């Protein structure tokens, strides 16, 4: 029989080459960290079927013009497995001594007993140095015995070696360290050594697959490696949201570790630009929360974000963060000038705590009802007479402002209507409109008094009157002949909305009872039927030719008797 050596073909993966007896160097070559992870996963998946389910794994691979069974490439039933002994003990089914390929397959095996037996070969010095990357993967194994043996082997090997070996295993240790349950040991044992993770290895991780990029960013943040520019590049250009978020957090941590003012200022500027450009809603909030928790943003930065940022959630989270900041009272004036009513209201609520309670009355006439309510609540806590303050503001028509009129109505005293009625003729249109709304709030202005205000010169007053009349169609119809085109158009819209609303309400009502059935028509008298000599429109002339002829017809053709 002629045998042929396996050449460099893409058909055989490293796991299949190990199964065919090739050494680790021949099967994997100068493999990267990701290649060792893929080798371990492939062998573990292929040997788990026999180890736990006792069945042969079958799969098909399309090669050329026909389907080839995976068993033609690699029959995993020939891989080492756990063989029970007669006295209750067992051992892997490999040759004695085991070859390098069998040890590598045993370290990746799906059966933990085979993995433990492969690691136990270290006691007899039969564990080759070429499988140390697989031993490092086993240090995060889910089986406790395998995990302990692997860590013992690595402690001995790393304690007696020089720098090249930790450098070779550093990238793989970073990837293994990403495993949540048991990867912390590998992350601290190898890359934590001085100079273990080189700049070239870190650059390779940050430019590889997603898991490698995440691992590289985590390692850079943990060990303070110089990767600031690479972290910002991933944060700004990576397609994966998780990588972008971790890139921002890594850059923040590296900037804080540096402690240099120029580096921190540059990082804060780039972070603000990132919040503006980032399109993912979750990434913005995630990275902002990280910046606040780490103390990366100063009170001035938070106040700027709260007052000027274009995203509402960022503004409001920044407002809450700056008010909780120890230096928040120093930037309170910037929050009081913000356009966001939530931010202004929160700042007004902080005035009394900051010892500036005497400034609260000026916010009783704020354009936002939320701000006015907050100011009223704070002043009531001090026993301030709000009604008297608003009455003073509305007493002089020359100095009254529109928001003061609404504030007086918000106190809810109908007796103040005598002070508001003269304001319906105020020369300022805003005061007239607010006075009309205030009287409606106090329920002292009837509906039939509103149509004259629909002819006001100011469109705001006209709109207020028409909005108050939207529930009275009879009064709206009287304005269809108004001389103002905008009033007629608005009235038609309100009437149409009322009609649609009424139709919808009628559809929700129970269906009316059906009308009573009409009685059947009485039968025609006998003399009205056509006789034998007269033509009929319902039967041929041959029917009923003689006496008894109708009885010979089918029942459905016989004339009624």
Image: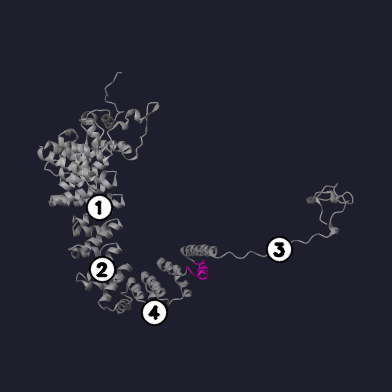
Q: Which residue is mark 1?
A: 287
Residue 331, picture quadrant? bottom left
**Which numbered disc, 3 or 4, marks the residue closer to the eye?**
3
Q: CA distance from mark 2 to mark 1?
A: 28 Å
The Cα–Cα distance between marks 2 and 4, rounded to whole angstroms, is: 28 Å
Between discs 2 and 3, the one toward the N terminus: 2
Mark 1 or 4, closer to the camera: 1
Lower position in the chain sequence, tag 3 or tag 1:
1
The percent coordinates of residue 504 (x first, y second) are 52, 62
Q: Which residue is more in the foreground, 1 or 233? A: 1
Q: Pointer 2 and pointer 1: residues touching (CB < 8 Å)?
A: no
Q: Which residue does the numbered mark 3 point to in the structure image?
A: 518
Query: In the image, which disc is placed on residue 414?
Result: 4
Q: Determine whether, in the image, residue 412 is placed left or right of residue 267.
A: right
Residue 348, which numbered label?
A: 2
On the question of residue 28 being in view, the answer is no
**Dot 1 surroundings within 10 Å: few (below 14), some, or many (20 or more)?**
many
Query: Label 3's element?
Result: loop
Q: In the visual, does 306 lie left or right of 553?
A: left
Secondary structure, mark 2, is helix
Q: Residues within 10 Å of mark 3 (few under 14, many from 20)?
A: few
Q: Are marks 3 and 4 in contact (CB under 8 Å)?
A: no
């Amino acid at each position: 029989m002629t045998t042929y050596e396996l050449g460099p073909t893409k058909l055989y993966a490293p796991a299949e080459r190990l199964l065919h007896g090739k050494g680790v160097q021949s099967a994997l070559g100068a493999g990267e960290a990701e290649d060792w992870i893929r080798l371990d996963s492939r062998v573990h998946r292929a040997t788990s079927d026999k180890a736990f389910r006792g069945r042969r794994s079958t799969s098909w691979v399309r090669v050329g013009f026909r389907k080839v069974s995976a068993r033609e490439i690699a029959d995993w039933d020939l891989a080492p497995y756990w063989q029970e002994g007669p006295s209750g003990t067992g051992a892997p089914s490999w040759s004695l001594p085991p070859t390098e390929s069998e040890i590598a397959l045993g370290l990746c095996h799906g059966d933990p007993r085979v993995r433990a037996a492969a690691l136990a070969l270290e006691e007899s010095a039969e564990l080759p140095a070429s499988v140390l990357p697989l031993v490092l993967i086993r240090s995060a194994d889910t089986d406790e015995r395998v995990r302990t043996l692997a860590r013992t082997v690595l402690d001995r090997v790393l304690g007696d070696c020089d720098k090249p070996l930790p450098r070779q295993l550093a990238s793989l240790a970073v990837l293994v360290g990403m495993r949540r349950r048991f990867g912390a040991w590998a992350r601290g044992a190898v890359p934590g050594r001085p100079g273990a993770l080189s700049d070239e290895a870190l650059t390779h991780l940050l430019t590889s697959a997603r898991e490698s990029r995440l691992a590289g960013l985590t390692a850079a943040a943990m060990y303070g490696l110089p990767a600031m520019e690479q972290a910002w590049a991933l944060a700004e250009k990576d397609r994966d949201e998780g990588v972008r978020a971790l890139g921002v957090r890594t850059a923040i941590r590296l900037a804080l570790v540096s402690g240099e003012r120029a580096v921190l200022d540059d990082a804060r500027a780039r972070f603000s630009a990132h919040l503006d450009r980032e399109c993912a809603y979750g990434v913005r909030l995630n990275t902002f929360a990280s910046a606040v928790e780490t103390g990366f943003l100063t009170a001035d930065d938070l106040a700027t974000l709260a007052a000027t940022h274009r995203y509402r959630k960022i503004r409001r989270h920044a407002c809450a963060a700056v008010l909780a900041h120890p230096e928040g009272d120093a930037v309170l004036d910037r929050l009081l000038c913000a356009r966001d009513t939530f931010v202004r209201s929160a700042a007004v609520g902080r005035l009394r705590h900051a010892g500036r309670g005497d400034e609260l009355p000026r916010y009783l006439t704020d354009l936002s009802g939320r701000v006015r309510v907050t100011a009223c609540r704070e002043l009531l806590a001090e026993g301030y007479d709000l009604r008297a303050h608003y009455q003073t503001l509305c007493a002089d028509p020359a100095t009254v402002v529109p928001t003061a009129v609404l504030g007086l109505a918000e106190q809810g005293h109908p007796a103040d209507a005598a002070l508001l009625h003269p304001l319906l003729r105020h020369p300022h249109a805003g005061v007239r409109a607010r006075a009309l709304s205030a009287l409606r709030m106090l329920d002292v202005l009837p509906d039939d008094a509103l149509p004259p205000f629909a002819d006001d010169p100011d469109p705001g007053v006209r709109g207020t009157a028409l909005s108050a009349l939207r529930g009275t169609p009879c009064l709206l119809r009287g304005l269809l002949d108004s001389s103002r085109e905008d009033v007629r158009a608005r009235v038609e819209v309100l009437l149409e909305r009322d009609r649609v609303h009424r139709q919808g309400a009628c559809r929700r009502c129970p269906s009316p009872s059906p009308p009573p059935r009409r009685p059947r028509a009485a039968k025609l008298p006998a003399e009205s039927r056509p006789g034998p000599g007269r033509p009929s429109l319902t039967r041929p002339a041959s029917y009923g030719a003689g006496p008894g002829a109708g009885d010979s017809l089918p029942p459905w053709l016989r004339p009624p008797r």
